[in-house]
Amino acid sequence: MTQLSPGDTAPAFTLPDAGGKQVSLADYAGRRVVVYFYPQAGTPGCTTEACDFRDNLAALQQDGYDVVGISPDGPEAIQEFIRDQALTFPLLSDPDLAVIKAYGAYGERTFGGNTSMGILRSTVTVDEDGKVLTAEYGVSPAGHVARLREELAGLQS
């Protein structure tokens, strides 16, 4: 998979949210958006990361960023995850991995000493014109949003 770099055009997408509503990258035209990819709703790392985005959402929005999460989970699993964690931003379902792969968030990963192909926990920030501002792959969930906010603040200064 080819990973994205700053300046690349972010791949367009349209995916269903937890309620089945179609959400597109084009819906965010004229706004900046953080698109993050996570392996599976409800797992410890994904819960840590989602709650971190939830807890920092107001600050991100104040800085002009919306947040969207994408995983291969079906809408039912996403709906349960949103309810259980009181998440207040859209999570989208990509069961065929098309968008995940287009963003370079699928590849070889190591977990528990085993190497396999799977979702790489990744975050891509897209500007108002659909260009990639930042692209991070294989991120650690703990403290990720604070690091991202520092990076984004550095881009604005």
Image (tube, rainbow, N blue to C red):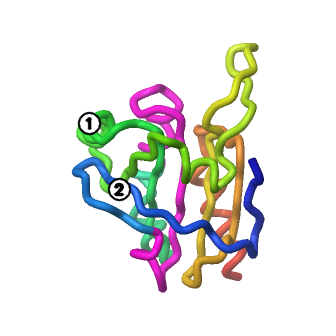
Q: Is residue 45 above or below residue 93?
A: above
Q: Secondary structure at mark 2?
A: loop
Q: Is residue 10 above or below residue 56?
A: below
Q: Which residue is mark 2?
A: 90
Amino acid identity at mark 1 = Glu
Q: Residues within 10 Å of mark 2 (few under 14, many from 20)?
A: some
Q: Secondary structure at mark 1?
A: helix
Residue 107 or 155: which is nearer the viewer? Answer: 107
Q: Is residue 3 left or right of residue 22?
A: right
Residue 85 x, y percent position in the rendering? 31, 38
- In this picture, residue 80 sits left or right of residue 57: left
Q: Residue at x 45, y 40 (%)?
A: 95
- Whether the magenta-drawn stretch holds residue 73 is answered as no
Between 28 and 117, the one lying in front of the other is 117
Q: Residue at x 42, y 62 (%)?
A: 14
Mark 1 burial class by Cα count in 10 Å: few <14, some 14-19, many 20+: some
Q: Can you say whether 25 is above or below 139 in the image? A: below
Q: Which residue is mark 1?
A: 76
The residue nearer to you, when weighing 124 against 4, is 4
- Which part of the image, by quadrant, shows the C terminus? bottom right
Residue closest to the eye, 106 or 126:
106
Give the residue type at disc 2.
Answer: Pro
Q: CA distance from mark 2 to mark 1?
A: 14 Å
> What's the magenta region?
25-52
